[in-house]
Image: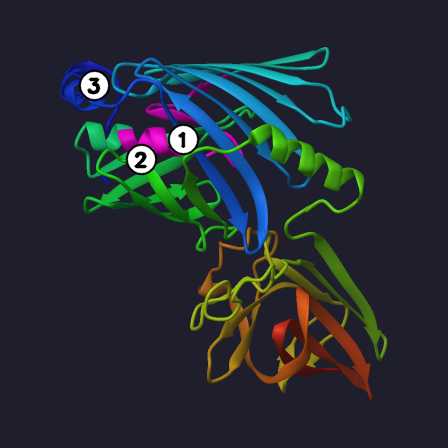
Amino acid sequence: MRSIFRGGVAAAAAVLAAQPALAQAPRGETGAFVVTIGTDTLAVEKFTRTREQLTGELVSRSPRTVTRSYAAQLNPDGSVRQLEMTSRMPDGSQPETVASVQFTPDSVISRVQRGDSVFVFRLGAANAFPYVGYSHVFFEQALMHARAIHADSVDFTAAPVGANRTVPLPVKLVGADSAHLWAPSGLQRVAVDAAGRVQTLDGIRSTQKFLVTRAADIDVDAFAAEFARRDAAHRGVGALSPRDSVVVTLAGARLSVDYGRPFARGREIYGNVVPWGEVWRTGANAATGFSTSRDVVIGGTAVPAGKYTLWTLPTQQGWTLIVNGETGQWGTEYKAERDVARIPMQTRPIVDAVEEFTIRIDPQGDGGVLRLQWDELEAFVPVTVK
């Protein structure tokens, strides 16, 4: 993947090449994005872009409703020179946060004020764009920049506003109407127009598995008020995949499972959210942890006492439980070479669909049964203590 950096002869040439394409963008262009996960709306964003400035408003609702307003100053090549952003919680439960971020050719300098506390970060980063949770206009700005300088791929850097870190943001343009973007949450497949503007963004391969669609206009204030009302009535979205744990004692052995619990939210689960034929984290976010205080036998396979992570390989022909020796990793960081065991599971349909992914260990006889339940399917395997 070829990197493009601001600075030096090559960058100057790229800026000059970009100017005619960028000059064709209409002044005062407005747009909006709607972020959904299944049947739930997670965020809405409205923005206005000129050649010199990008301003907008965003409201998101997970885990609680937050409103943000921003104003970014743009360089002639479409990259961001400076960003000012204010974040508020409508219920006033936390102090307002004001961030000011400067982008130079080789660094990002942030000043963040939360209440009476002020934090200043200076990070080495080339080709950086702001990263704001649930905002997609800055991803669009990066894609438009790549299109304008005629680069098939660019190694951008994402700078999360208010955080003392940066993360890679590779972009690859695929033909005239699509792109792949590796955001902090994972791979996102993007449909774009000729200038690189986002039309839809499919994050099914990302951690949050959301969908972004473009709209001509949207009433951000109305959405913010409705989201806040739902929070006050305890009907907010909350955490998308809350962490949970299962602890049981079987024949004197203490078994525990720690996992993220995604919701179905009206989505097609198997073959979509959970792809067939691919190793699944068996939950959400961080890898699913498993520990046993004594040696056990899972589905006829011996598993020594210790700490592990659990993964699965779902296929339409059957499921396989994977016990892996690495612990503490994120759920996208599966390493097959660390596998301890691969164990066939049985499956059966569930009459009453399970909305929230659930792991259970039910005592049975001298042992128990490990059950994975979601939507209209259960995968299970017997567990006994040695």
SS at badge 2: loop
Q: Quickly name the residue at label 1.
A: 31
Q: Could you tell me if residue 362 is visible in this image? A: yes
In depth, the one of 326 and 283 nearer the eye is 283
Q: Secondary structure at mark 1?
A: strand
The image quadrant where one finds the C terminus is bottom right
In front of the other: 152 or 55: 55
Q: Amino acid at mark 3?
A: Ala
Q: Which residues are magenta?
A: 122-144
- Contact? badges 2 and 3 (CB < 8 Å): no
Taking the image as shown, residue 252 lies to the left or right of residue 314, namely right
Residue 6 location, x and y as percent?
26, 19
Q: Is residue 25 magenta?
A: no
| Alpha-carbon span between mark 1 and mark 3 | 18 Å
Q: Which sits earlier in the primary sequence, circle 1 or circle 3?
A: 3
Q: Amino acid at mark 1?
A: Gly
Which of the labelled discs sits on residue 60, or is there none?
none
Q: Which residue is mark 2?
A: 197
Q: Quadrant of residue 302?
A: bottom right
* Residue 126 lies in the magenta-colored region: yes
The residue positioned 31% from the left and 35% from the top of the image is 197
Whole-percent x, y for residue 49 in the image: 37, 21
Secondary element at image label 3: helix
Q: Which residue is mark 3?
A: 23
CA–CA distance in space, label 2 to label 3? 15 Å
For the residues carrying marks 1 and 3, which lies nearer the camera in this image?
1
